[in-house]
Image (cartoon, rainbow, N blue to C red):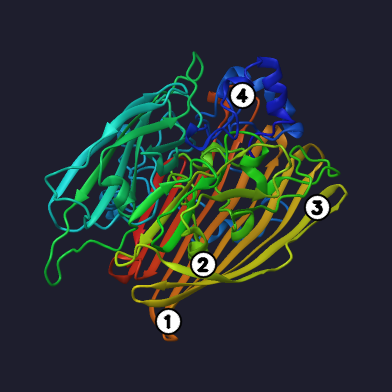
Amino acid sequence: MRRHITGLLGALALAAGTLAAAAPANAAAPAGLPATADPAAAPAAPARGARSTGLAATAATAAAGPAGPGSANAGGAHPAGLPAATVAAEAAPAGPGPAAARGARPAGFAATVAAVGAPAGSGRATARNAPGGAGVAGGDVPAEFGSDWHDPVTAGPAVARPGTRACEVTLAEARFRDFTPYRGDYAPPTACGPAPWAKVVLRLDGKVKGRQYDRLGNLTLGGVEILRTSTPQPSPDGISWAVEKDVTRYRDTLSRPQPVEMLIGNVVDDTYTGVIDVKVTLTFYAAERGPGRPAAPDTPDRVLPLTTPAVTTPRNTERLLAEVYATGSGGGCEEYWYLTTPDAAPYSCKAADGPYREVRVLVDGQLAGIAAPFPTVWTGGWSNPFLWYVTPGPRAFDVQPVVYDLTPYAALLNDGRPHRIEVSVAGVPAGQSGWSTPTNLLLWQDEARAVVTGALTRHDEGEPANSSRWTPGTEHRLDTEGGHRLTVAGYLDTSHGRITTTVGREVRGTSVHRWTDGEGLDALTATWTDRESVTRGATTTRTERTYTMDGATTLGAGDRLRTVLSLGDRANTVTLRGGRPVDNSRLDDRYTGDATYTTNVPRDQRHAVGTTSARHRLYGSGAPGGCYDRTVATAQGTVTVDRRRC
């Protein structure tokens, strides 16, 4: 629902002749690609490319610049075929709160402003009150978007920090205006003791003002990617935001001096004026000995960036994980892969095999891991940036890696020879770019053995399924269903005995895509599931992940473009030992939004309105105190609700 290369954006790019100024959609992983195509290529794009062929007239907006303030009602009937529940989040127990604005908060709730300024969560944004009091929970809700709005805020929990001695190190400080990376040097602190530490927290503080698209960025330390992020779109008056992430697992990389490289690819010119100003710090918390004191957690002994397919691992590896920061991004149709259609269907984004995607890991040419990619919606997605100005979608600011347990292959890799570990995305048309898959290998070593031997004992792969059925008509329909199953097992003879590891994973994706000729209506209902079971010795960990997307964009009378959308990110994890549950956690992160604006007019005539709601719930061992539940709702860029239930 963003920029359609073959439709509107293609026409604008040809007219402006500037599409090539953006980095290739699938440059090397550390390239820091923009989350959009080159802004100069589509200056009209209030949503970075309103709908393609059906909105070709929006090319007239080119002189108006990116979507800006405006007003009126988010009027119009609910988009045809879209469940009413999409905008009634608070009605459902698991929902993130009301998608429709509920008016100004009562005076008694003014204290919730303090909650909005709470410390940033893991990969979550921290908000401050926007200048002039805009965006204050309990303040007046404007009739439409103005020239400023509340800083970005997400509903997730803060990174828990131990109460031990803390040391801060500045990792990077830069102002990104082009595709020149920041390069520097890192040295671990000395005042908090040597590694391992109780915790290490990365924090990015950013600010930007004027006109700018959202951009994709990344940060590497010694070649190891430790952060992949995207930026919010600014208000004319300027915004600031923060992202925090627990990076303790990179203890091996952090324990010695390393080169630093960071890039948020950007384009700045007379129209797109937003220079992205960021500072990244690491805060180290010392580990302490003694009952009840914060000890160092179990972290990998080695972290190896997969810079080439050929890799040689330590011969005493007894556990091996791969983490892949997989993103469909950098412009082009793979940025919204879930909307692509087979070549025969009359839609602006094509993929011969349809929208099913799967992230795969191969070891020496054999399939070793499968996963469903997370359908990230960046902060200009679904043709409507007014949905994301204050409340970004799940994971937009903290791109979480897909994690694979490759321990069954450790015996093969422990022979001291180079082996090929490769990552690919199934379903991407041959020769087409659009995905970045930077990968790290996390290894635990057996200190009492120089060489750990064993064998791969099982490899059971189901036949991959992928079916897309197009039904033509006044309203076109594409029904897609895909899936795959893989089980691998192996053993290792370690210093503490023979350990057998069995990994089973099953992924599935189903979607219904509906659109009209010209794409004046474009709707999607989709669900992706990723079920994983890892048994190591007597311990089994089972995780069920579910990602959902349900939305529609319509172009109505008076060129009023309306987007109604709900997103879901859910996961249930249970750990059993000897068949008995010993740990569990449950995540339910949901977003809903409804925003409308007028296309093909200058920014001060767009009359934009929008309501959003995000509810983040976390229970069990992963939650502070075992329970976390927070809802943040907005209307016209003002925070109207900030409620905590636990």
Quadrant position of the C terminus in the picture? bottom left
The answer to which of marks 1 and 3 sits earlier in the sequence is: 3
Q: Can residue 231 be seen in this view?
A: no
What residue would you read off at disc 2?
408
Quadrant position of the N terminus in the picture? top right
Q: Which numbered marker is on residue 307?
A: none
Q: Which numbered marker is on residue 477?
A: 3
Judge the density around disc 1: few (<14), some (14-19), many (≥20) Cα neighbours within 10 Å: few
Q: Name the residue located 77 percent from the left edge and 49 percent from the top edge.
A: 353
Q: How far apart are marks 1 and 4 (CA)?
A: 59 Å
Q: Under tag 2, what secondary structure?
A: helix
Residue type pointed to by label 4: Ala
Q: Which numbered marker is on residue 538?
A: 1
The answer to which of marks 4 and 3 sits earlier in the sequence is: 4
Percent from the top left, x then y, of residue 78?
66, 52
The answer to which of marks 3 and 2 sits earlier in the sequence is: 2
Q: Under tag 3, what secondary structure?
A: strand
Percent from the top left, x then y, of residue 378?
53, 41
Q: Of the residues tagged 1 and 3, which is closer to the observer?
A: 1
Q: Of the residues tagged 1 and 4, which is closer to the observer?
A: 1
Judge the density around disc 2: few (<14), some (14-19), many (≥20) Cα neighbours within 10 Å: many
